[in-house]
Amino acid sequence: MITITAEDPECAARSGFLHLPKGDVPIPAFMPVGTNGTVKAMLHSSLKDIGYPLILGNTYHLYLRPGMEVINKYGGLHQFSSWDGNILTDSGGFQVFSLASFRKITEDGVTFRSHIDGSKHQLTPESVVDIQTMLGSDIQMQLDVCTAPGIKKREAMHALELTTTWAKRAQRRRSEKDGSYKGFLFGIVQGNFYKELRKRSAEQLSELELPGYAIGGLSVGEEPEIFRDFLQFTAPLLPVNKPKYVMGIGTPDYMLEAIEAGIDIFDCVYPTRVARNGTCFTLEGMLNLKNTRFRADRLPIDPECSCPTCSRYSRGYLRHLFVAREILGPMLVTHHNLQFLYTMMDQARNAIASGTFPGFKKSFLERFRGKV
């Protein structure tokens, strides 16, 4: 499901394509997050106009609302949401992990209470495959055990072994689906911040020869240096002929670090979440439109950006929209942020193809870390 067309001679960065049921995806690629079947403040047509062929849906939230009975009547999430591109769905494991006081993990699966109405539910490796198959996910993730930084090695080891066991069970259930469903099942490497356990998890999951692999348990509050260290340690442990995915990263520095380590895809709510609060990506760094100094600023968000927002609107007008709490403000800035990241990915792919990715990364981040 992956074709590598270029590898940078100075690092592990690589470019190519993921071959998915709804069309090819150029890699490396950022996936906008569509938690409830929509990328917040964005039309699907706008995502297509930018060029995004792959977005992420949230299994936990969609399972609870509107529920699988409703989505199943539409024939899946693509038809329900009118998105004809590819969809990756997470397993719901991270959301359940965040409900610490409302969930219980056993060998069988995870029991939890809904954050919506308190109702009790259980997710198992098998039911998560079933749910994502009903969603019609083009990439589905196994149910895994997420762990917080700072836990003891014994606890991390238990989570790792349970994740491996659940991956085997998920693989068996996926193999039972009929041939009409073409979605791919990815495994998730765990091991917390213990390199020995990361290596063990990667080895155990690689033996299953799943279609692709994600590195879980990073970007969960650890220091950037630790993130980089464990990313660079873990990525080479995964099969080179399979897609590599880091979950939950969405800032230029983390994304470019991931690409340099050989990661193909990543996702995060950050770019769209901060956009709804008036914070923008620019080549010169982050810009908060709510700052008073932009009250009469006639410049676009980023003078070098060609997105519809930057082509038509000034920082002063956009600030006015946020101060007046007009819905258009978050919509326009969300479009800009996603266009900015798509353009950055395109530039990264070109740099890999020309064998100049480390230099591109260095110059981009030197400029981005400046002040606007």
Image (cartoon, rainbow, N blue to C red):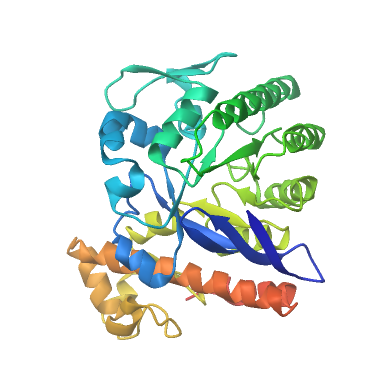
Where is residue 7? Give x, y as percent: 75, 68
Residue at image position (70%, 73%) is 352
Residue 363 left/right relative to 288: right
In the rendered view, would you say 97 is above or below 267?
above
Q: Quadrant of residue 210?
A: top right
Q: Can residue 98 be seen in the rendering of this structure?
A: no
In the rendered view, would you say 260 is above or below 206?
below
In the rendered view, would you say 113 is above or below 198?
above
In the rendered view, would you say 336 is above or below 84?
below
Residue at image position (59%, 55%) is 265
Residue 70 left/right relative to 61: left
The foreground one among 327 and 18 is: 18
Q: Quadrant of residue 306?
A: bottom left
Q: Residue furthest front?
A: 179
Where is residue 310? Give x, y as percent: 35, 80
Where is residue 123? Give x, y as percent: 46, 22
Where is residue 356? Give x, y as percent: 73, 78
Q: How many marks?
A: 0
Q: Can residue 179 be seen in the rendering of this structure?
A: yes
Residue 145 left/right relative to 276: right
Residue 246 left/right relative to 209: left
Residue at image position (28%, 29%) is 69
